[in-house]
Image: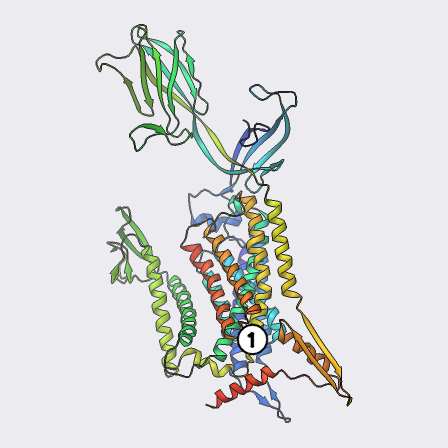
Amino acid sequence: MNSLAELSSNLLYIAFFFYFAATVFYILSVTGRQFRNKEGDVKKNRWGTWGYIATVIGVVFAFGYFFTRWAAGGHPPVSNMFEYTAFLAICFSLAFVVINGIYKSNVLGLFTIPVIMLIIAYASVFSTEIAPLVPSLQSNWLAIHVITVALAQGILAVSFGAGLVYLVRTLDLSGKKMTKRTFGIEFIMYTLLTGLAFVILTNVFEATNYEAQFTYVNEQGEDAEKTYNLPAIIGPNEGVLQTEDRFSPIFYAPDWIISEDLNTVVWSFGSGFLLYWVIRLIGRNRRIAAMLQPLLKGVKPQTVDELSYRAIAIGFPLFALGGLAFAMIYAQIAWTRFWGWDPKEVWALITFFFYAAYLHLRLSRNWIGERSAWLAVIGFAIIMFNLIFVNLVIAGLHSYA
Amino acid sequence: MPVPGTSQDYYLENLQFDVELYDEDDERFQGAMQAAPGAEHIETFRTHSILYKPTDESTVGAGRELEAISEQDIEVNRPLYFDNYSVYQLDYKLNELSAMSFDVEDRETGESAGSFTVDLNNPEDYYTLDNGEEVYIYDYFANFIINDAGEPTTENNVPDNPAFIFEMTNEDGEEELTFIRIQRNFEIRDDEDDPHQYAFTFAGIDTNHVTGLKVRKDLTLPFLIAGGSIFLLGLLQGSYWPHRRIWLQRENDGGILIAAHTNKNWESIKKEIRSVTEQTELSEPVDQTDEEYEKEYKEKDNL
């Protein structure tokens, strides 16, 4: 690795640190005391401003990472899972900085910056090496198409943050009984914790160099080997553990399942579940959203609702431009056709239609407030699904690992 | 060769095909290359081509006079454009079979009857041997398979697994058929114990690099671009030019009424009115929906 590439990854670490600092500041700003001055006006503490400043510095360092990596590799660093996912998080933070510069909501920072950190941490699970570009990616349209899409998705992600704030602020979470709404909001919390669990697990076991070798029988009925980087709960088909002192599997997967991936999924959902209940027990069995709700009293629901909508109003045209228009021009040049029903193309179209439906429902059917907030959350779920599931599980032209 | 789909209005010649790999010592990519040892990192592949157009005088058919129009490298992401057509570099195959040679022996005399070479992409009907005899290609399968009906046929015209049935007439005037494919050679005999006069043996192969180009003509693209542009412009206009009205009315008693309406971005018009009225004697209009909301939530908080 040359020195520029090293500098680049250090800059990303520094940016991550500043996002962390921003999270701490935003927590302080929301939980901290609010003073009333002599006239009786509510005087807010200054931590929110510090959080915002830390985020801005983080964004600056993150772009430092982006451009030094571009210089080191000689091509725009948006060509594989690590690079794109990290850049999406950077665009998310940039969009937050711009939009929060207008609306100034500390609570929004509290909800978005941790998600941004989570996405960066998720990106680092993939190979961070600078890889040479395959022929079809060697085009200026790569930068134009991908950067526009990432910006658009980053802005749309802000609408998710605002939608989540709206929901936690306004939903009635006091009842003991589970309703569709309380289930929905707790499911979002659980999903975020599962992401956190996955990131922590993979990083911890990677740091300790955990490896367990298995011999197993693969789907063609042949003997093969595979390596687990997490303790195997679910072993491969007829797997035999080869490494000593390693956890022996409890179940064995059939041959048509990629067992180490299933194992990781089980680990993530399991520890997410554990994490969720630990937090709930600490909070005396209140729902997580209900624990957060008192912090959000100062938030005016209409403002976050409009913020969420405004983010989509900016993100949607940009997504149509980058994810469809530029994408089609690029596909026409590189893949000879502007549209080929590649899984990623299909999901970009679904994303486009979803947000188009959001705007139509909001502007002509008056779906504002709660309905609109749920849609903003689902839209972000579609984007993340398109990023993670479509790239990793469905084989297509966009599967650049 | 004539460019398919252009009704022989254009011809394209492949002068050379190159594949370039990334330098294994490239400092930038050391990490990624060491992570996948032995993997090929293809930088690019290109076809150096010349585009021809028949001169006006020549008529359709063989032996037309061609005029070179342009010489260009066709590369991934750099198609060749001409007259609404685009030629794309799609893929390639190195060392594809291109020709096969055969020796023929006359069993009566024990001497060689000669040899011949078949161009697999463009086989001729007859080949004349040194002794003056002719070999007729009775059937040629470029990519030999036996289909579901149990008949020999070809999967496509790519010579991946070529097979031939040759026909020769022996001195008795009988037609002899011989089936040959890679590592298979048998004479189709009427009588098992009566070998053919002419015996075929496989002598050698020739390979070349094959480039995969794709020709496209799409006249709908301008309409698509126009439609997409209109959509995006309309979207921008619809999103960013909100409909807004602000009314000011002087009342008889000297008071001023201020009211506003917008079809979207309600909060921002409120913000603007606030900034307009802040330094004046006008008081900011009250948003009654806000009041309702506050009331509702006060009640909830008290519960």
- State the residue at coordinates (37%, 66%): A268
Q: Give the x, y percent position of residue A38.
A: 63, 94
Q: Would residue A220 be found to the left or right of residue B137 on screen?
A: left
Front-lying residue, A179 or B45: A179
Front-lying residue, A176 or A265: A176
Q: Quadrant of the N terminus of chain B?
A: top right
Front-lying residue, B166 or A83: B166
Amino acid type, callout 1: Val
Total number of numbered labels?
A: 1
**Chain at tag 1:** A
Q: Give the x, y percent position of residue B108.
A: 29, 6
View extreme (bottom): residue: A38
Mark 1 lies on a secondary structure that is: helix
In the displayed structure, B17 sits above or below A185; it is above
The crowd level at tag 1 (other Cα within 10 Å; few <14, some 14-19, many 20+) is many
- State the residue at coordinates (53%, 49%): B28
In the displayed structure, B2 sits above or below A332; it is above
Q: Quadrant of the C terminus of chain B?
A: bottom left
In the displayed structure, B247 sits above or below A332; it is below
Q: Give the x, y percent position of residue A257.
A: 31, 54
- State the residue at coordinates (27%, 63%): A247
Q: Give the x, y percent position of residue A77.
A: 54, 54
Q: Quadrant of residue A126?
A: bottom left
Front-lying residue, A14 or B92: B92
View extreme (left): residue: B193
Residue under pointer 1: A304
Q: Using the rendered image of the protein, determine whether residue B70 is visible from the camera's viewpoint.
A: yes
In the displayed structure, B101 sits above or below A400; it is above
Q: Using the rendered image of the protein, determine whether residue A75 is visible from the camera's viewpoint.
A: no
Q: Quadrant of residue A270?
A: bottom left
Q: Would residue B51 be found to the left or right of residue A277 on screen?
A: right
